Amino acid sequence: MTARPIRYCEAWLRDGLQSWPEPVATADKLRMATAIAAAGVPEIDLTAFVSRRLVPQFADAETMLAGVGRVLRRVLAVTPEGAERVVAAHVSAGRVDRCGIPFSVSEPHNLANIRRSHAEHREAVARMIDLLGAAGIAPLLGAVTAWGCPFRGAIPAEEAMEIARWGVERGAQVVMFGDTTGMADPAGVRRLFSMARREWPDVELVAHFHDNRGLGIVNSLAAIESGADTVDGCLGGVGGEPRKVELWLSGDQGNTVSEDLVAMLAAMGFETSIDPAALCAAGRLAEEVVGRPLHSRVLRAGLAAGTGAG
C-alpha cells in the first residue's frame, strides 16, 4: 500500500463525550481542544447541536466554537432545528466548516436512534442540507450502521451505497461510512469503500469505526487502502453507542484509539501533519480530565523507535 496524505479527525470532544455519563467542564473541553490542535490534528469533531435537555454534555456548543483556534471544525446535528442552531452559531459564535448528519442505513436503528423512518428522515435531512449549504457549511452525510446493527445483523454494502448516493445527489459534499456498533471487518470495509471511490472519485470519503470487536485500527487501514480520504478516531478510545460507562470500561465498546492509529500511520509513512508524541500528551490530558485510565496502548508501551511526526 502506497503511503499518501491522510486527514485525521479527532472525535474525543464530540463522539467521545456523547455518551459519557459525567459532565465535563467547558474549560476542560477547551484545554483538550487546544492540546489536540497543538499536536497538529487538522480536523476536530467539536460538539453537537442537539437537545440541551436530552444531552446536557453539549449545552456549551456555541462556547466551544468561540474558543477554538484554526482547525477544520466539524459539528453534528440531527434535526432541522439543530441545523438552524449550527447556522446561527456559524454567524455569531465561530466558524463551522462541516456539519455531520447521521442517517442509519438500518431503518430499525434509525427509528430507535432518531425516531424517524427512512422516508421521514430523508425529508428532514434534505432541509438540513439546504440550510447548511446556503450558509457555506459543508453537509457531511453519515451513512451509519453501514456494515450492520443489532436489529438487523449484517447489512449489504449496496444499502449503504444507496443512502450515500441519495445524499450526494441531494447535495452532501462529504460522505462518512460509520460502523456504529463495531460490526465491520476488513473485507467488507474494502468492498464498500472501493465501490464508493469508483462511483465518486471527487467526493471526500470519511471512515469512522468503533472498536467493539477489536477491529477499529485494521478497518481504518482497510478503508485507507480502498480510497478513504479521512479517518476518525478518539483519544483513549472513549465513546461509542452505550449509555453506561461500565460497558466502555470493560473494553467492549468505544471508538478507534487515536494515539495508536496515528502512531501506526506515522510508522507506515503516511502524511498526517500530526506529531504522535504531542498527541500522546493530549491523551494523557484526556485521562486527567475524566479521572480514569483510558485504552491507548502506546501511552503504556511507548511509541515505537523512529515514530515521529507524520
Image: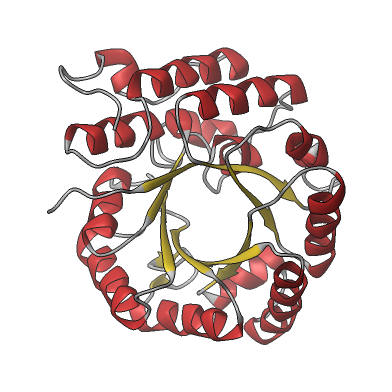
Determine which quarter of the picture holds residue 224: bottom left
Taking 233 as reference, is 20 left or right?
Answer: right
* Residue 111 sits above or below residue 33 on the image: below
Taking 129 as reference, is 262 left or right?
Answer: left
Q: Position of residue 242 (x, y in %)?
A: 56, 45
Is residue 275 visible in this depiction of the protein?
Answer: yes
| Residue under the point 78% across and 56% down | 86
Q: Position of residue 270 (x, y in %)?
A: 24, 42
Return the residue nearer the eye: 273 or 161: 273
Q: Position of residue 176 (x, y in %)?
A: 47, 63
Is residue 19 visible in this depiction of the protein?
Answer: no
Return the residue nearer the eye: 279 or 4: 4
Q: How many marks?
A: 0
In the picture as drawn, the residue positioned furthest to the left comes out as 1
| Residue under the point 76% across and 51% down | 49
| Residue under the point 70% across and 27% down | 22
* Residue 89 sits above or below residue 163 on the image: above
| Residue under the point 58% across and 70% down | 103
Taking 47 as reference, is 208 left or right?
Answer: left
Determine which quarter of the picture holds residue 147: bottom left
* Residue 172 sits above or below residue 246 on the image: below
Q: Position of residue 71 (x, y in %)?
A: 57, 39
Q: Quadrant of the C terminus?
A: top left
Q: Quadrant of the N terminus?
A: bottom left
